[in-house]
Image (spheres, helix red, strand yellow):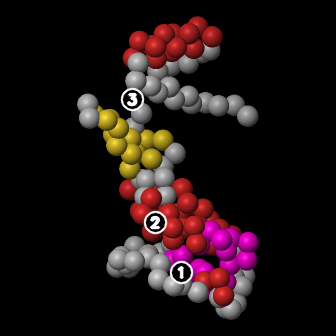
Amino acid sequence: MACDKLRVVGNNGDAINKFKQYLYKCFHMKDLGRLKYFLGVEVAQSSKGIFLCQWKYALDIITEAGLLAVKPAATPCEENHRLASAAGSVLSDPSMYRHLVGRLIYLCFTRPDIAYNVHILSQFMQNPCTEHWHAAL
């Protein structure tokens, strides 16, 4: 499998430049400049540091799930939930549940506030029921 992009990061500009010069000698490559967007994460750099944002990625999840017009909930997961004892019908196509929860897991990278809820949902990836699907939505 070929890799077509390489990100070099660090806090020592001289060392980074020396390393890039070494890579230029060994491989045919070019510098694409500062990182702006990578794997669903928007990167904004300033003198104060680096800001990571997955706003577009989150919007894509909401749009794909058909929830664009839905009002947000203050508490996404009910306290004392009973998802483990859900007795509803098993989803005919569990891949849609797995896809949604997988995307939510990646969203936790910049949204640790949803990590607990996503952890609960991820426990039912093997055999999700309709209750699990509704909780994920």
Residue 26, position as x, y percentages in the image: 63, 10
Closer to the chain start, of discs 3 and 1, is 3
Q: Please give the name of the residue rendered at 62% of the width and 68% of the height, measured from the top-left corner.
A: 122
Q: Residue furthest left?
A: 47
For disc 3, the neighbor class at 10 Å (few under 14, some 14 to 19, many from 20) is few
The residue beneath circle 1 is 135
Numbered tag placed on residue 114 in the rendering:
2
What element does badge 3 sit on?
loop
The residue beneath circle 3 is 34
Classify the position of the N terminus by image quarter: top right
Which of 123 and 29 lies nearest the eye of the viewer? 123
Residue 124, position as x, y percentages in the image: 67, 74
Residue type highlighted by circle 1: Ala
Q: Please give the name of the residue rendered at 51% of the width and 29% of the height, measured from the top-left corner.
A: 7
For disc 2, the neighbor class at 10 Å (few under 14, some 14 to 19, many from 20) is some
91 to the left or right of 5: right
Determine which quarter of the picture holds residue 33.
top left
Residue type highlighted by circle 3: Arg
Which of 68 and 109 lies nearest the eye of the viewer? 109
